[in-house]
Image (tube, helix red, strand yellow):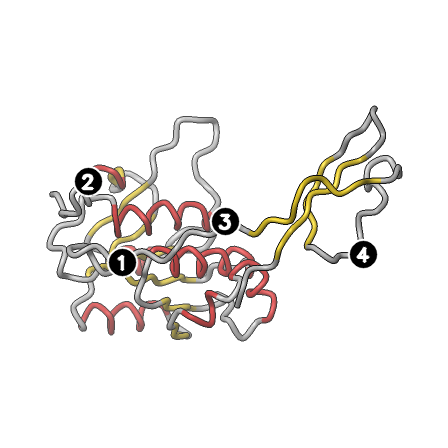
């Protein structure tokens, strides 16, 4: 499917000059949404400058994710989109975590929920035990005294898949699930807040685990 072309409209009011994009052919935007003055089309139509699919690096850890009781449909949708972009193999959705069967999830996943394999589990502990038995290494994204900086935790044994475990936005990772993880990694925080939005934190961790050890020549470094 070819990307939709866009146009830029700008308010003709010299005291406003509000500028905004619309899909070409849209009947909206003839009046400025800020001041109500007429707007005009600026320049030529253009298309979204998407990034072309990249070939997978030759040596990089395979990663799957387990989302346990992540409550926000929009966060989970964003995590699907990130997981698809980073090349994760599968999403394991547990407890109250919404699945792609919820139409709201697609508002932030934007189709990634249809491209990325996923499973649903009532109980995250049962899922974690089964995945661990299959050879996945459980790494929790969580704070606390036992956590080490994500950026100090270069993934060892690139051939062994990692299961990135993410918990509830407020309560964090279930303690019994945390106990099953061989590593606990956290994202360093230097501001007044002590955590990131769960979808943003997931994105940082997913991309670092997949590509953080790749040097400029494409080799994995430990």
Q: Is residue 206 left or right of residue 81?
A: left
Which residue lies under the disc numbered 2? Answer: 216
Please name the residue shown 32% across and 41% down the image.
Answer: 186
Outermost top residue: 15
3D distance between C-alphas at marks 3 and 2: 24 Å
Which residue lies under the disc numbered 3? Answer: 49
Residue 56 horizontal/vertical position (percent): 25, 58
Residues marked 1 and 3 touching at CB (< 8 Å): no
Residues marked 4 and 2 touching at CB (< 8 Å): no
Which residue lies under the disc numbered 4? Answer: 27
Outermost front residue: 44
Name the mark nearer the viewer: 4 or 2: 4
3D distance between C-alphas at marks 3 and 4: 23 Å
First in sequence, mark 2 or 1: give its number: 1
- Along the line of sight, the residue nearer the viewer: 41 or 205: 41
Q: Secondary structure at mark 4?
A: loop
Please name the residue shown 18% across and 44% down the image.
Answer: 154
First in sequence, mark 1 or 4: give its number: 4
3D distance between C-alphas at marks 1 and 3: 19 Å
Quadrant including the C terminus: top left
- Along the line of sight, the residue nearer the viewer: 53 or 156: 53
- Along the line of sight, the residue nearer the viewer: 76 or 211: 211
Which residue lies under the disc numbered 1? Answer: 55
Residues marked 3 and 2 touching at CB (< 8 Å): no
Task: Give neighbour class at mark 4: few <14, some 14-19, many 20+ (Cα, 10 Å).
Answer: few
Q: What is the count of numbered marks?
A: 4
3D distance between C-alphas at marks 1 and 4: 40 Å
Residue 215 horizontal/vertical position (percent): 18, 41
């Amino acid at each position: 499917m070819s990307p939709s072309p866009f146009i830029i409209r700008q308010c003709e009011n010299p005291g406003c000059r509000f500028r905004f994009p619309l899909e070409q052919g849209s009947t909206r935007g003839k009046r400025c949404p800020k001041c109500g003055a007429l707007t005009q089309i600026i320049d030529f139509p253009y298309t979204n400058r998407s990034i072309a699919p990249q070939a997978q690096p030759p040596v990089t850890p395979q990663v799957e994710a387990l989302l346990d009781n992540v409550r926000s449909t929009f966060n989970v949708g964003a995590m699907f989109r990130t997981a698809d972009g980073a090349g994760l193999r599968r999403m394991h959705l547990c407890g109250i975590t919404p699945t792609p069967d919820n139409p709201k999830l697609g508002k932030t996943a934007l189709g990634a929920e249809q491209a990325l394999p996923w499973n649903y589990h009532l109980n995250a502990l049962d899922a974690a035990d089964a995945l661990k038995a299959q050879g996945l290494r459980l790494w929790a994204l969580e704070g606390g005294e036992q956590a080490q900086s994500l950026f100090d935790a270069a993934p060892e044994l690139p051939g062994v898949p990692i299961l990135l475990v993410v918990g509830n936005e407020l309560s964090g990772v279930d303690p019994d699930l945390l106990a099953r993880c061989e590593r606990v990694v956290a994202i360093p925080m230097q501001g007044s807040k002590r955590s990131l939005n769960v979808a943003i934190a997931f994105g940082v961790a997913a991309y670092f685990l997949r590509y953080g050890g790749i040097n400029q020549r494409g080799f994995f470094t430990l």
